[in-house]
Amino acid sequence: MAEPKATPIGPGVVQVVHDGRADIVYVAGTSDDRWAFSNGRVYRETAAPESPAKTRSGSRPHVSQALSAPMPATVASVSVQPGARVRKGDTILVLEAMKMELPLRAPADAQVVAVNCRVGELVQPGTLLVELE
């Protein structure tokens, strides 16, 4: 098996060739907090481990998963509402960036706790879009 090869093809855009196929990966963030988006999935790498969420009395229930914007984008569509059940791989929302549609999918079976964005909104990398539990 050949080692994967990554080739920058534009600002924040990398072509990764592996196992006989080529994928486009969008990358945003800093060296301490890097986000990558590829094939409907968002990946995050941080330099230091994140601290556990602090809870306050009267705060929202524990959120076990969240979908955040991987890059600056416009919210093109939102397919869920709070309380909805989603299955792994379901499209939760679609972002539009660099004239491309970027679907964000449920990472696992879950229930939508909150939707923190609306269609037409411009979002920045790291913006919390949807909370799941």
Image (cartoon, grey):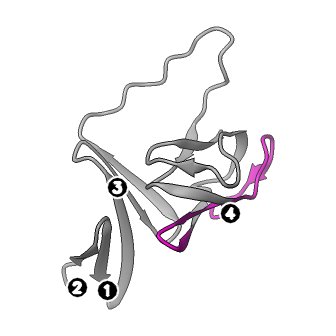
Q: Quadrant of residue 25?
A: bottom left
| Label 3 packing within 10 angstroms: few (<14), some (14-19), many (20+) | many
- Is residue 92 or residue 123 the one in the foreground? 123
The x, y position of residue 84, in whole percent, is 80, 47
Q: Mark 1 is on which residue type?
A: Asp
- Residue highlighted by disc 4: 90
Q: Quadrant of residue 55?
A: top right
- Spatial CA span between label 3 and label 4: 24 Å
- Spatial CA span between label 3 and label 1: 25 Å
As helix, strand or loop, the secondary structure at mark 1 comes to loop
The x, y position of residue 103, in whole percent, is 59, 66
Residue at horizontal 57 percent and vertical 36 percent from the top: 64
| Label 4 packing within 10 angstroms: few (<14), some (14-19), many (20+) | some
Earlier sequence position, callout 2 versus callout 4: 2
- Is residue 91 or residue 101 the one in the foreground? 101
Magenta includes 38?
no
- Residue highlighted by disc 1: 19
The span picked out in magenta is: 77-101
* Labels 2 and 1 touching (C-beta < 8 A): yes
Earlier sequence position, callout 2 versus callout 1: 2
